[in-house]
Image: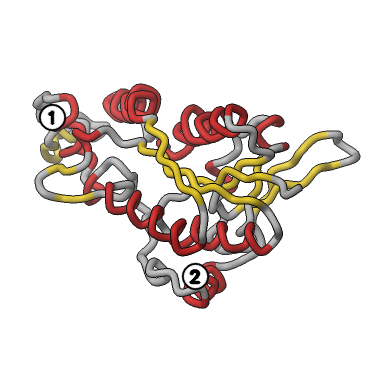
Amino acid sequence: MKKRVLLGMSGGVDSSAAAIILQEKGYEVVGATLKLRPDKCDTVNGSKTCCSINDILDARRVAYKLGLDHIVLNFTQSFEKKVINNFVDEYLKGKTPNPCIYCNKHVKFVALMQRAKELDFDYIATGHYANIEYSDKAKRFLLKKSKSSKDQSYVLYNLTQEQLSRTLFPLGDLDKGEIREIALKHGLHIASKPDSQEICFVPDNNYSEFIKNFTKKEFSPGKFIDLDGNTLGMHKGIP
């Protein structure tokens, strides 16, 4: 009997290629797209971010092309509470949060693992560039860097032993060029889709505008002051 894998499909080329690789290795694959960003963050000033409805449709189209079942899981409330609110709160304290790390730790892998258990899957998988190995010496699973220049192991360091034991990263030893070739070979329409590198809920990387719109607050301007007390200029507020 084939091992069953619940694959997180974002609608991008990485997770789409991961589906192909898993199929070729003999797994039974079902695609799962997580709806994370709340509707109120879908469009700000007419600008679109990634993780949109179009990305969900891209994932569904790829799944159909590959003969996979596809489901959409709604975790918008959890994402807003645990990721967006943390991002805003930390930014207003003058810190620099990494929402991808928070998402992987508190939402994405938790959501996939929860559904995998409920639906009796053996593994979950994603299109991250990272590797997992089991160490007989350490008696534990180890998260290791990908050979690719796109390595993403640094945003996955919070994964637990249980999560690592039931997670597959099919792209661990491949580079981006190879991934696009796989997608192109299989006639996927997203083969040349641009990478999404910005924060998924912040349009155009404009943090200050997003925070202002999200909190409905205006932020007071302030002064840049050097160590001798001289005012060097003004800023528009901490965001």
Front-lying residue, 66 or 54: 66
Task: Determine whether, in the image, residue 31 is placed left or right of residue 168.
Answer: left
Residue 136: percent from left, percent from top: 89, 40
**With respect to residue 15, does 135 lie above or below?**
above
Instruction: Check disc 2 and report the residue beneath it.
Output: 183
Colour scheme in the image? secondary structure
Residue 120: percent from left, percent from top: 64, 33
Residue 132: percent from left, percent from top: 71, 47
Badge 2 local density, few (<14 within 10 Å), some, or many (20+)? many
Residue 144: percent from left, percent from top: 69, 49
Front-lying residue, 73 or 86: 73
Instruction: Check disc 1 and report the residue beneath it.
Output: 222
**With respect to residue 66, does 39 lie above or below?**
above
Task: Determine whether, in the image, residue 52 is placed left or right of residue 30.
Answer: left
Which residue: 61% across, 59% down? Answer: 171
Label placed on residue 86:
none
Mark before the other along the chain sequence, 1 or 2: 2
Name the image quarter holding the C terminus. Answer: top left
Amino acid at pointer 2: Ala
